[in-house]
C-alpha cells in the first residue's frame, strides 16, 4: 500500500459519520502515527478532528492492527468522563479498493506539551498542577473500568477551552475482558512509540503483563516535567527540591511513582490524587505569600473532604464567594474517588449554577460500571444540581445525553417544566433506549405517563395489544398510579387474561386492586369471579387457595352490601333524582 498516495486521496474526500445525513469536508492533515492519520474536518462553522486508520506502507491492511483500531473506536466511544476525550461520530470511508474506519473527536487547542515550561519557573505553577490532577482523574477513571493506557505522554493529553485536559489516543490500551469486544487484542510485542515515558517493564518485556502501574510511572515523569521543565529522557534527573525547597514533599511522591519495581510504586491513582492534593494544601504554592483567592481555594478543598456539617456549610460559603473562580476545583472534585466528596461537589456546583459546569453535572447522571450492573451513585445529586438551572439549560442537558440515565433522575430534572416541553425530550430518551430499565427502578414509560398520560397511554396500549410480557409488579408500581380508572380496568383485564403469568402470591395483590378501586360494582364482582376461577387453577397449595377464596368472598360481600345500601338510599330519596343506574356506577366502600 502506498500510504502517501492514500493520504493524498483522503484529503480530497468527505467524511459522513454513521447515522448522519451531512458530510464533513477535510480541511487538512494534522499529523500521523503508526496506524492513524488525523485530519481537520469542517461542516459549516463546526470544526472537529478525524482519526482515520491508514497502516504503514510495509504493513498493508494488517488484520490485527485493523481490529485494534476498531477496538480503539469502540473503547473511546464507551468512555464517559470529563477528562477523557469523547467520540462524537464514527464511520468508514472508501478509497479505491480499500475501506478505512474513522472516528471524530472535538478539536483541541493544543496538548499538555504547551504547558511544560522551558525551565523551572513559578509562573502558572498552580495552574500546571491543577491540570495534572485533572489528568490523574481521567486516567484513574480508565483504570477503574479496567483500561490501562500504556502510552501516556504530554502529546496524548489534549487541552481544550480554559486549559481543560482530556486523555486521548487509546490505540494500544490494554482493556479488561468484557469492556469491549476486542479486549484481548494486546499482543506480547505491542510497545509504545515514545521511549521517554516507558516504564522499565515495558522495555522489551511481554506487553500483556504490563498493567496500570506503567501508567503511574509515566504520570510521574509527566509531573516532574510539568514542574521542572526538564525532559525525563535526561539521565540522573535532579531532585525537585533542588529547584525549590518547598518541593521536597512532591519529590517523595515522584520517587515512589517512578520506582523501578512496579510493586514499590503507588498501587492506584486515587492515592496519588489525594496525596498530591493534601501536599499542595500543606506546603502551598511555592510563590511567596498566597492571595486570598488561593487561600480560599485551599480551604475549600480541605472542607469538601470533611464529613462535618458545619464544614460543609462553610465550604458552600467559600464557593459562593469565589463564584467562577471555584469552578476548576469543583469540576476536578467530581472525579474524586470518595463518593461523599463527589456528592458535595455536585451540590456546590448546583448552588453556583454556572453553564461551564453543565458537562460535569451531565456526567454525574451517568452510571459507574465497576460492578456487573450499572450503579447510578451520583445521579440523584447531579439531578438535584440541575434543578437550579433554567428550563432551557435543563432541556439542553437532557437532549445531549449519550449514556444510560435513570427515569427517576430525569423526572427530577424536568420537575416544574411544562409537559409540552419536557415530554418530547423524555420520549426521545425512551425511544433511543437511554433510560435504564430494571425491575428495581421506575421505568421510562412510567415517567412518560406522569408527564403526559394520554400520549404515553398509546405506547402502553400497543404493548398490551401485542401481548408483550409486563409483570404485575411493573403494572402496579409504574402504570396503575399514573392512569385513570378506565385505563386501570384495562390493565386489570390484561393481567387476568395472562393467567399463566400470575404467581400465587400475586392473586391477593390483584384482588386488592380490583376491590378497592374506583370501579363500578358490576366490574368488581365480575372480575373477582374471574380471579376465583383462575385461583382454582393456579394456586396449588390447598391452605393458600382456601385463604384466598375466603378473602375474595369477603370482598364480594362488601361490594354487594354497599350496592344494597345505595339502592336503599335511592328508595328513600326518590324525590331528589336518585336512580339505580347512578347507584351502580358509584364507588364501593373498600
Image (tube, rainbow, N blue to C red):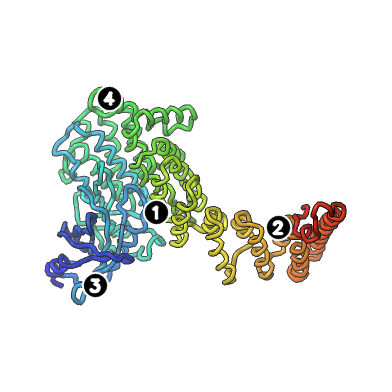
* Nearest-to-viewer mark from 2 and 3: 2
Q: Position of residue 26 (x, y in %)?
A: 18, 62
Residues under labels 4 and 1: Cα distance?
41 Å
- Find disc 4 in the rendering and name its residue: 291
- Find disc 3 in the rendering and name its residue: 99
Task: Say whether residue 383 is left or right of residue 468.
Answer: left
Residues under labels 3 and 1: Cα distance?
33 Å
Whether 388 is drawn above or below 399: the answer is: above
Look at 22% across and 64% down and name the residue there: 52
Q: Secondary structure at mark 3?
A: strand
Q: Quadrant of the N terminus?
A: bottom left
Residues under labels 4 and 3: Cα distance?
57 Å
Question: Which badge, 4 or 3, comes first in the chain's sequence?
Answer: 3
Task: Say whether residue 416 is left or right of residue 224.
Answer: right
Whether 378 is drawn above or below 89: the answer is: above
Question: Which badge, 4 or 1, comes first in the chain's sequence?
Answer: 4
Q: Which mark is residue 399?
A: 1
Amino acid at each position: 500500500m502506498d500510504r502517501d498516495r492514500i493520504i493524498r486521496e483522503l484529503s480530497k474526500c468527505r467524511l459522513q459519520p454513521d447515522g448522519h445525513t451531512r458530510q464533513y469536508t477535510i480541511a487538512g492533515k494534522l499529523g500521523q502515527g503508526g496506524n492513524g492519520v488525523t485530519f481537520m474536518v469542517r461542516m459549516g462553522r463546526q470544526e472537529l478532528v478525524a482519526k482515520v486508520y491508514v497502516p504503514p506502507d510495509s504493513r498493508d491492511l494488517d488484520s490485527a492492527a485493523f481490529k485494534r483500531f476498531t477496538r480503539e473506536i469502540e473503547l473511546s466511544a464507551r468512555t464517559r468522563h470529563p477528562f477523557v476525550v469523547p467520540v462524537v461520530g464514527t464511520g468508514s470511508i472508501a478509497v479505491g479498493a480499500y475501506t478505512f474506519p474513522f472516528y471524530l473527536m472535538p478539536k483541541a487547542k493544543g496538548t499538555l506539551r504547551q504547558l511544560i515550561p522551558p525551565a523551572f519557573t513559578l509562573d502558572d505553577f498552580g495552574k500546571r498542577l491543577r491540570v495534572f490532577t485533572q489528568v490523574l482523574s481521567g486516567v484513574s477513571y480508565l483504570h477503574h473500568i479496567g483500561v490501562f493506557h500504556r502510552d501516556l505522554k504530554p502529546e496524548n493529553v489534549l487541552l481544550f477551552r480554559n486549559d481543560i485536559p482530556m486523555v486521548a489516543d487509546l490505540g494500544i490500551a490494554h482493556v479488561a475482558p468484557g469492556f469491549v469486544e476486542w479486549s484481548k487484542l494486546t499482543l506480547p510485542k505491542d510497545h509504545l512509540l515514545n521511549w521517554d515515558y516507558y516504564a522499565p517493564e515495558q522495555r522489551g518485556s511481554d506487553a500483556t503483563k504490563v498493567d496500570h502501574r506503567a501508567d503511574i510511572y509515566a504520570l510521574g515523569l509527566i509531573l516532574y516535567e510539568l514542574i521542572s521543565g526538564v525532559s525525563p529522557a535526561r539521565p540522573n534527573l535532579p531532585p525537585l527540591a533542588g529547584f525549590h525547597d518547598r518541593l521536597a514533599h512532591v519529590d517523595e511522591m515522584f520517587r515512589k511513582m517512578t520506582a523501578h519495581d512496579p510493586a514499590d510504586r503507588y498501587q492506584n491513582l486515587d492515592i496519588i490524587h489525594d496525596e498530591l492534593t493534601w501536599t499542595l494544601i500543606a506546603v502551598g504554592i511555592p510563590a511567596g505569600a498566597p492571595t486570598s483567592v488561593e487561600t480560599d481555594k485551599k480551604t475549600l478543598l480541605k472542607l469538601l473532604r470533611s464529613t462535618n456539617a458545619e464544614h460543609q456549610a462553610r465550604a458552600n460559603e467559600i464557593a459562593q464567594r469565589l463564584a467562577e473562580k471555584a469552578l476548576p476545583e469543583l469540576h476536578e472534585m467530581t472525579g474524586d474517588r470518595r463518593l461523599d466528596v463527589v456528592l458535595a461537589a455536585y451540590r456546590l456546583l448546583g448552588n453556583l449554577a454556572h453553564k461551564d459546569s453543565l458537562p460535569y453535572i451531565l456526567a454525574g447522571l451517568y452510571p459507574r460500571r465497576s460492578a456487573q450492573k450499572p450503579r447510578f451513585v451520583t445521579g440523584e445529586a447531579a439531578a438535584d444540581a440541575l434543578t437550579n438551572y433554567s428550563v432551557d439549560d435543563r432541556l439542553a442537558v437532557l437532549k445531549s445525553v449519550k449514556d444510560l440515565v435513570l427515569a427517576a433522575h430525569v423526572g427530577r430534572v424536568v420537575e416544574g417544566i411544562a409537559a409540552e416541553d419536557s415530554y418530547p425530550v423524555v420520549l426521545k430518551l425512551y425511544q433511543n433506549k437511554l433510560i435504564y430499565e430494571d425491575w428495581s427502578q421506575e421505568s421510562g414509560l412510567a415517567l412518560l405517563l406522569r408527564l403526559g398520560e394520554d400520549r404515553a397511554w398509546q405506547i402502553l396500549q400497543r404493548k398490551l395489544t401485542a401481548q408483550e410480557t409486563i409483570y404485575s409488579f411493573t403494572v402496579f408500581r409504574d402504570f396503575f398510579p399514573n392512569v385513570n380508572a378506565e385505563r386501570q380496568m384495562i390493565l386489570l383485564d390484561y393481567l387476568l387474561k395472562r393467567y399463566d403469568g400470575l404467581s400465587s402470591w400475586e392473586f391477593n395483590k390483584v384482588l386488592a386492586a380490583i376491590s378497592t378501586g374506583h370501579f363500578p360494582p358490576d366490574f368488581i364482582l365480575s372480575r373477582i369471579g374471574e380471579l376465583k376461577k383462575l385461583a382454582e387453577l393456579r394456586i396449588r397449595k390447598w391452605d393458600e387457595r382456601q385463604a384466598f377464596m375466603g378473602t375474595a368472598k369477603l370482598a364480594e360481600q362488601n361490594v354487594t352490601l354497599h350496592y344494597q345500601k345505595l339502592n336503599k338510599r335511592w328508595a328513600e330519596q326518590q324525590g331528589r333524582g336518585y336512580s339505580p343506574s347512578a347507584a351502580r356506577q358509584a364507588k364501593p366502600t373498600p
